[in-house]
Amino acid sequence: MAFRTLDTVDVAGKRVLVRADLNVPVHDGKISDMTRIERLSPTIRELSEKGAKVIVCSHFDRPKGKRVASMSLAPMAAALEKILGRRVRFFEDCVGVAAEQAAELLAPGDVLVRENTRFHAGEETNDPAFAAALARLGDIFVNDAFSAAHRAHASTEGVAHLLPAYAGRLMQAELEALHAALGNPARPVAAIVGGAKVSTKLELLGNLVGKVDVLSLGGAMANTFLAAQGKGVGKSLQEADMHGTALDILSRAHVAGCRILLPADAVVARDFKPNPPTEIVSVDAIPADTMMLDIGPESVAALIRQLPAWKTLVWNGPLGAFETPPFDAATVALAHAVADATRTAGLRSVAGGGDTVSALRQAGGIDQLSYVSSAGGAFLEWLEGKTLPGVAALEC
Ligand code: 3PG
Ligand code: MG
C-alpha cells in the first residue's frame, strides 16, 4: 500500500493534528508501561522541531461517550512532557470553540495534548459532525496510532478524509515491518502462534496457513489441536467445541503446503500455581489427572533447531502459561534463540500482540528482534488479513 509520510510535507507554522495511541497500561493511577509514549515521541519531536503547532489527540480506556475523571489523558500529557524534555500543554476537551481558541494560541514548536476523544459519543460512532469538529483543529492530520487503526472511529478514520492525511513515524515503521513480514517476505517464512484459545485466533490461523511455509502452535491452543487428533490431554485447558475447526485448519494447511508443527512433549502439573511439582511427558502419554502448562524441552529445542532455516518469523502468543513460573521456560528459551538468530543469522523477526510483548519483555532480548509491534488487537487483525480502517484511510 502507498501512504504519505512526514518526508513529503512542510509542516512549519501549520497546526498538525496527531492521532496518538495514549491508551497505556495504568495501575493504581500510575502509568505502568511507557512503551507507547516512548515510541510516539519521535514523531512529536520531529514535528515540533520542524516548527509545527502539534495538537495530540487520543482515546484512553472505554469511557463510552461520557466524561470519566479517572480516564483523563492529563497523566499521559505529563509523561510525554518528561519523555520529550519539553513543555507539553494540556487542554480539557478535544473539540469545541474553547479548544479551537487554545489551538490559536500555540506558537510553532508547541505541543498540546487534548482530552480523551472517547469522552464524546461521536468518536466511536465515527459521527461526521464530530470528525468535522476534530478537523477544525488542524491544517493537516498525522496518524501515528497503528495500534488503534483497527477501529473505524472519528479520530482514526473519519478525520483522515477531511484533512490532508499522513502516516507518522511509528505508523510508518509498523506498516513497513508488517509488509516485510507477511506482505512480501523473504522465504521460508514461519509463524509461531501461542496463547490460550483457538476460538479467538481462528481467523488468524486461517489466514496464516495460506501465507506462511511453517506454522508452529503452542500454548493452550495447541492442546485443542492435540485433542482433536484424538490424544488424551488430561485436565488441560482446551476447547472441545473447536475440534472440527482445528482439523479443518490442519487440512487447509496441508492443501496450501504449510507445514504445521505441534508440540511433541509437554510440561505437566496437577495444580496450576507457582512452582508446583512438574513432569515432562510425551503428548502421547499425558497423565489423566494433569494439565499441560508449557511445551516441553524437546519441542522447544526442535523449534530452535529450525530457526536458522527460516528467513522471516512472525510471532504471536506465548508458548505456555508464562505468567506462572516455571511455565515461562519455553517462551523464554525461544525468545533468546530468536534474538540470537536475528542478530547472527539474518532472521527477520516480527512479534506483536498484547501478551506477546509482555512475555518477550519478561524474557529479555526484546530489543534484539527486528520489530516488535506496539499494537495488540490491531496486530491480530492485521495477522487475520483484515484491512485496518485507520490504515486504509491513509492510502493515496
Ligand atoms: C489497544 O490498546 O488495543 C488500542 O488502544 C485500542 O483500544 P480499544 O481496544 O479500547 O479500542
Ligand atoms: Mg484492545
Image (cartoon, rainbow, N blue to C red):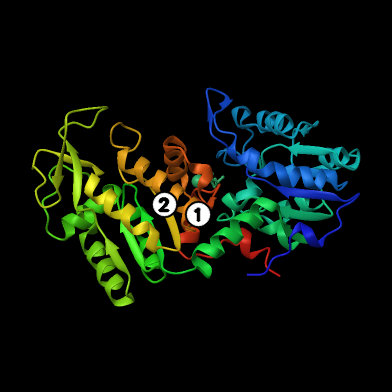
Amino acid carrying label 2: it is Asn
The image shows residue 257 at horizontal and vertical percentages of 32, 75
Q: Quadrant of residue 149?
A: bottom right
Within 8 Å: ligand 1 and the Cβ of disc 1? no
User: What residue appears at the point 27 percent right and 54 percent down from the top-left corner?
Assistant: 302
Mark 1, residue position: 379
Task: State the residue at coordinates (66%, 28%).
Answer: 75
- 138 or 99: which is nearer to us? 138
Task: Indicate the quadrant where residue 191 lies.
Answer: bottom left
Above or below: residue 26 compared with residue 372: above
185 lies above or below 41 = below
Residue located beneath label 2 in the image: 316
Instruction: Report x, y in % for residue 338.
Output: 42, 50
Q: Secondary structure at mark 1?
A: helix
Q: Earlier in the sequence, mark 2 or mark 1?
A: 2
Is residue 261 left or right of 162 when viewed as pictured?
left
Q: Are marks 2 and 1 in contact (CB under 8 Å)?
A: yes
Residue at the far bottom: name it: 255
Mark 2 sits near ligand 1, with its Cβ under 8 Å away: no
Which of 176/312 is in front?
A: 312
| Residue 323 appears left or right of 311 | left
Q: Quadrant of the C terminus?
A: bottom right
Which residue appears farthest toward the front when viewing the image? 344
